[in-house]
Every structure is written in structure tokens, then in C-alpha cells.
Image: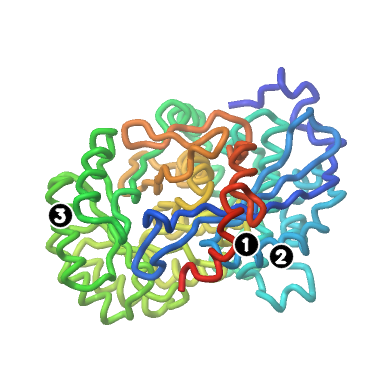
Amino acid sequence: MPADRSRSPKGRADVLAGVIVRHVHLRDIRFHTSKDGSGSDARSKDPDYSCVYVELIADGVPAGVKGVGIAFSLGRGNEVLLQCARLLSRAVTDLALEECRHNFAAVWRRVTGAADGQLLWLGPEKGAVHQAGAALVNALWDLWAKIEQRPLWQLVATLPKATLLAALDLSDVTDVLQSSEVLDILTKNDTGKSERVKCVAEHGVPAYTTATGWAGYSDEKVRSLVLAAKAEGFTAFKMKVGLGSESDARRAKLLREVIGNEGRLMMDANSVWAADEAIGHMKALAIHKPLWIEEPLHPDDVLGHARVAKALTPLGIYTAGGEQTVNRVMMKQFLSSGGYTICQQDAVKLGGLNEWLVVAFMAKKFEVPMCCHAGGVGLCNMVAHLGAIDAALISGHEEEGVRMMEYIDHLSEHFEHPPKAVNGRYAAPIAPGWGLDMKPGALEQFEWPSGTYWADKPQHFEIAGW
């Protein structure tokens, strides 16, 4: 699908010319999700979904157009991400956006702190600095797509190969993925690409819901939510495990009864088990026919995940991970070792869209399905695009198989362009950019500590989550 040049009169070759980022506006936004148990799991009992909300103010853009990105957290500590974003914002200030088209990889290294000889000690390329950098990187992509007046997924899916390759930093992963291999994947996927882009635009990408199975919900609430989700067309559901053998078995039995034998059931342990525990628990739960076990172990345990995958694959159970995989180097190890047989990487835990693309190409090479993690604040908005990019540009699959993206509608009411699910599928986004712009009222209400919601709760984060 070519660029709509009627809305970008100078054409893609120079539409970014003269666009210079002049100011970075940062906000600490927090939602009281612990109030009703939303987001709760075996490890995080009462999270308060929060984000650093980034706005890039630029010269040379239409009035009101800003580049928006987010860095996600569970509440306390969001101020750490905020300070990291402040430190990194100098790499974006006075940046000519046109440089992103010519050599986004170099921009990425500056913006994420990967080229900062002092900030590197706080990583390197992991943790709060990397997540804050991702918010800035994703805001640059958002600004670019808004200037082109295109949803981000369409922009990325139709970029020239040279532009896309220039956005990828393959350092430290060239032993498994070289630029020539990326080019080969893109070239092979040229066949049928226009049809895939059209198909995604019309039908979206498959989704599954987690919103029905939070650990803190009662069985009665879970049953009710699952029935409601089935009525909306969902056929795939994820539940939390790791709460004890009896509790896990009871909840799995309930889910299987409600979704039926034809429904797909996934399980998520949120990293609370050791390898032997994970294998034992999942062998016991195999009677309920789970499609995958997500995050069974500590998120850095490469060898442990490989053991779990080897034990569970003969049972037809995939081993999924990526929600907390901090960069492309760690993902290289999980994919090449066979530790992840489902890749769940999103674009906020690592260094933004650029690094996610590197991971997605590695997953394609290793034939590991991409099933992105979502939820939180704005992650579903982004995953609607990531799923579309994977389907149209990277995996180029003829059959969707187990590929599906996580969908949760919590907090979507606070966005100008919330993600939508239709018959159990993400609808393809149509608004320009990521669709991360929050409503002004939400920003005023939930900014910490000055927002109207938090004005009478100044001690909340001193006690929450302990």
C-alpha cells in the first residue's frame, strides 16, 4: 500500500525535512488498579498500573501534533523511570526527525543511552534506563507516523527495505542474525505482502484475553467474565497459576469447563517456580490441555527454560516468554537454546520498536511464533500494531496457527484511540501513530502526585505493594 501522498504533499522522500524536536514533556501517570485486583498475579498481588507519559514537541509539524510514548511500571518506582527519561531527553532535544529515516539505528543508540559511557553502567541496555529510552524511541516513531498521517503499522509495513534495515541495531546478535538474512526475509515476504496488508486492514489479527483470569478475582467473577468474553467472540483465554497446586487445579478445571474443549487455554506463572517445580506442576495440569505455560521461571534463566521446554514439548505444551526479556541479546539466547517456543516480546521492556523488530526477525528465523505480551497502560494500543507488523511484514504466515496477541481492555477508556477487539481479533488501528494519546481529563486526574484522584492519597505508594 503506497503512502497517501495527497496527505503528505512533499512525499515520503522529504516529508520529515524541517521537523525538529524542540521539547520533551514528561508526566508521571498512575492508576489505582490494585483497588479491584486488576493485574494481580502470583508475584504482583496488588499492582497499580502506571506509566511515564512522553510528549515530543516539534517544529515543522501541524498544530497539535505530538509524538507520544510510554514507559510502563506497576506503581512505586515510576519516578525512577521519569528521572531516566529526563536524563535521556537531551538525546532527543534538537533532533532532526529526518535522521530517523536515514539511520534510525544510530539515533536509537543515542536515545536509549547505549552510546552513553556513563549511563551504560546502569544497564547496559536493560532496566529503567532502557525502558525510559524505549518511551522516547517509540515517541519518535509516533511522531513520524502522525506526520505521514498513517497508523504506525502501515508505515512500518511499507517502508523501503533500506530504511528498515537502517533502523536495526544488530550488534551482539550477528552470530544468529545478519542484515543479509533480514533482507532475505523481507525479499521473500514481498510475495503476497500487499494481500497480507489488505487482510490485516480488513480483519485485524487474532487475540486472546487475560482480563478474565486475574489471580485476585473470585471463581464466580472469572466464570462471569469468561462467559461475557465468549459472547464477544473470544475463543482463547489465559489464567494465572503459581498460587498453589490445589488453587491452580481448581481454576484450570473451571476455565476448561466454561470455555469447552474447543477453547484454547493458556497459563501464566509469572516467574514464581524453579525448573523442577514448573515441570511437575505443568505435568499435573496437562489434563486441562494448556496451550502454553508463560514465564514459568525467573526471566533470566536461559538454561532452566530450555529444560522446561524440552520436558513439556512432548506434552503439546509450548513454553512462552518475553514479557520481561530485557534486550535482543537475552532473546537471542532464549530462542537459540529452545527455551522459548513462543516469543512474547513487547516494545516497552526492551529498547522500543527498533529492538522489537530485531527480536521479531530472530523469532522468524528460529520459526518461533510471535504472541506479544500486552496489558498495562497503553501496551494493547501498541500490540495492535506489533501484531499487524508481524503478520504483514515479518512472519508472513499463510496460517495463523498459535499466533495471537494478548488483549486486555483495562484503562482503555483513558485513550483518545483505544484498541478494539472484534470477534476475538484485534481490529487494525486506523488512527495515525501508535494511538497512545491520552485524554486530557485522564492526564489531569491521574498525574502523580498532583492529579485530582491522588490529591487525598499522598501516602498510597508508601504502603501499596508491600
Q: Is residue 110 left or right of residue 399?
A: right
Mark 1 and mark 3 lie on one chain; the one further toward the N terminus is 1
Q: Looking at this rendering, what residue extends furthest in the top direction?
A: 6
> Which residue appears at 36% of the width and 31% of the height?
422
Q: Is residue 447 left or right of residue 298?
A: right
The label shown at residue 84 is 2
**Cα–Cα span, label 1 and label 2:** 9 Å
Assess disc 1: are there few (<14), some (14-19) or many (≥20) residues with their C-alpha within 10 Å of its C-alpha: many
* Marks 2 and 3 close (CB-CB < 8 Å): no
Please name the residue that numbered disc 3 is placed on.
254
**Amino acid type for the residue under numbered disc 1:** Gln
**Cα–Cα span, label 1 and label 3:** 37 Å
Pick the residue in front: 311 or 247. Answer: 247
Decide if residue 139 is in sight here.
yes
**Amino acid type for the residue under numbered disc 3:** Leu
* Marks 1 and 2 close (CB-CB < 8 Å): yes
Residue 433, position as x, y percentages in the image: 63, 36
Q: Name the mark nearer the viewer: 1 or 3.
A: 3
Pick the residue in front: 202 or 229. Answer: 229
Please name the residue that numbered disc 1 is placed on.
131
Vertical order, 414 against 290 (above or below): above
